[in-house]
Amino acid sequence: MRFNLIGLVLLLLSQTVWSAAKIENWQTPQGSRVYYVRTAGLPMVDVRVVFDAGSARDEAKFGVAALTSALLDSGAGDLSADDIAQRFESVGANYSAGVNEDMAWLAIRTLTEKALFDKALATFETVLSKPAFNQADFEREKARTLAGLKHREESPGELAGIAFNKALYGDHPYAHPETGVVETVAGFSADDLKSFYQKYYVAANAMVVIVGDVSREQAEQTANQLLSKLPVGSKPAEIPVVTMPSKASKQHIEFPSTQTHVLVGLPGTYRKDPDYFALYVGNHILGGGSMVSRLFEEVREKRGLAYGAYSVFAPLYRQGPFMMSLQTRNDQTEQALDVLLKTFNEFLDKGPSDKELTAAKQNITGGFAMRFDTNSKLTDYVAMIGFYQQPLDYLDTFQSNVEAVSIEQIKDAFKRRVKPELLQTVTVGAGK
């Protein structure tokens, strides 16, 4: 069993709960933005470096951002993958990396004791600034990715999601899956990853998030050390605006499954959207509130047509998807879809009741503090705030922004932004 120092500390000490987080912000000499929160209670720190290098930057090479991210710790400088893993493990540090549509990130969580912190940070710096992209490592990770992509073809849920995004976004950079497709990934060379890294993993395109028990001075030194060996480079052009579908569409994909996956939606909201809180609170009532939402009540509780039904807005830099979803028995697909759409149209027409709005606000604000009650959760929030350049008091004002939403604002926002005549419907299952 591996001995993880951080895990031991987490067992022995309780984490501080923040009612609000004081986020400090500055720029490094190379122009990178830094977001820092000092937290007390645990001798640990989360450090995350974020780049505008998500799958929307793939261009025609679908999956290159994800594969680049996956290969960073496979070898760097004169360190092998095993060397990197051993160096992190020897000081109880955890390394992670990932991508979504908008961003790529790599991160460490480490203890703040100087000897442990310094070794973890030096290793992290090497991974960040000197990835090797060795041919053997590349071939292994590429093969693993291709195996995953082929396995994905056996999942009706995955196929539904891919078809749904394509229906919503057409030729927009948000249309393709983050991990790419077999046809593109099969053609990658190690040089493709090197080129992507050299273009996007630069200081001008970087943001650093530091959350933990370190001083402002230590945070500044950490950010400067991490980015000092990166070229300055330049920020990429903005992601293109999203074009809404011109009309509704319905697509069925035949698949030998006992259940049919149903997805309905269209491009929804974005991070700086003035309608965001009205859409967010309204969606909590429609289908985002799990077992207390209308979709769950109408589809599952009243009729037993599905185990669950939900809706979600997934805001991105541009309009992320609004999606209503359920899984149902193949022979009940049309009935379940009909109930889903009727419930949605009634909500669109009449909006929520006073009782529903009050309950939603209580539900959202009542558990809000628990959303960032650990370093890890808080780091996620600060990274979102920094990357999308939200107000630094976002966490302080979140609950008041929720409380300020009215029924009329919800009705107005939904009617303007979620038009039934543009809904895209995808079903994946056996028979129709």
Image: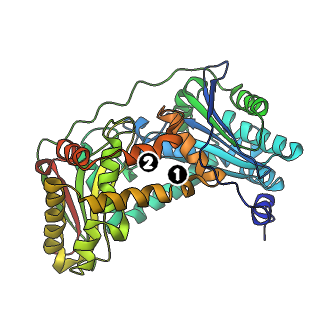
Disc 2 residue crowd, few under 14, some 14–19, many 20+, Cα 10 Å: many
Image point 23% across, 53% down: which residue?
265
Image point 50% across, 59% down: which residue?
367
Disc 1 residue crowd, few under 14, some 14–19, many 20+, Cα 10 Å: many
Q: Which numbered dot is residue 185?
A: 2
Image point 20% across, 80% down: which residue?
303
Q: Amino acid at mark 1?
A: Lys
Q: Residue furthest top?
A: 29
User: What is the quadrant of the N terminus in the image?
Assistant: bottom right
Marks 2 and 1 in Cβ contact (< 8 Å): yes
**In the rendering, at what x and y percent does residue 148 appear?**
46, 61
**In the rendering, at what x and y percent does residue 192 appear?**
50, 36
Q: Nearer the viewer, residue 379 or 369?
A: 369
- How many numbered discs? 2
Q: Amino acid at mark 2?
A: Val
> Of marks 2 and 1, which one's residue comes earlier in the chain?
1
Q: Which numbered dot is residue 142?
A: 1
**For numbered disc 2, what is the local secondary structure?**
helix
Q: Is residue 256 left or right of residue 8?
A: left
Q: Where is residue 121, by image quadrant?
A: top right
Alpha carbon of mark 2 to alpha carbon of mark 1: how far? Answer: 7 Å
**In the rendering, at what x and y percent does residue 358 appear?**
34, 58
Q: Is residue 81 above or below residue 384?
A: below
Q: Is residue 301 left or right of residue 42?
A: left
User: What is the quadrant of the C terminus in the image?
Assistant: bottom left
Q: Is residue 345 above or below residue 112?
A: below
Image point 29% across, 62% down: which residue?
356
**In the rendering, at what x and y percent does residue 256 appear?**
26, 76
Q: Is residue 142 left or right of residue 424?
A: right
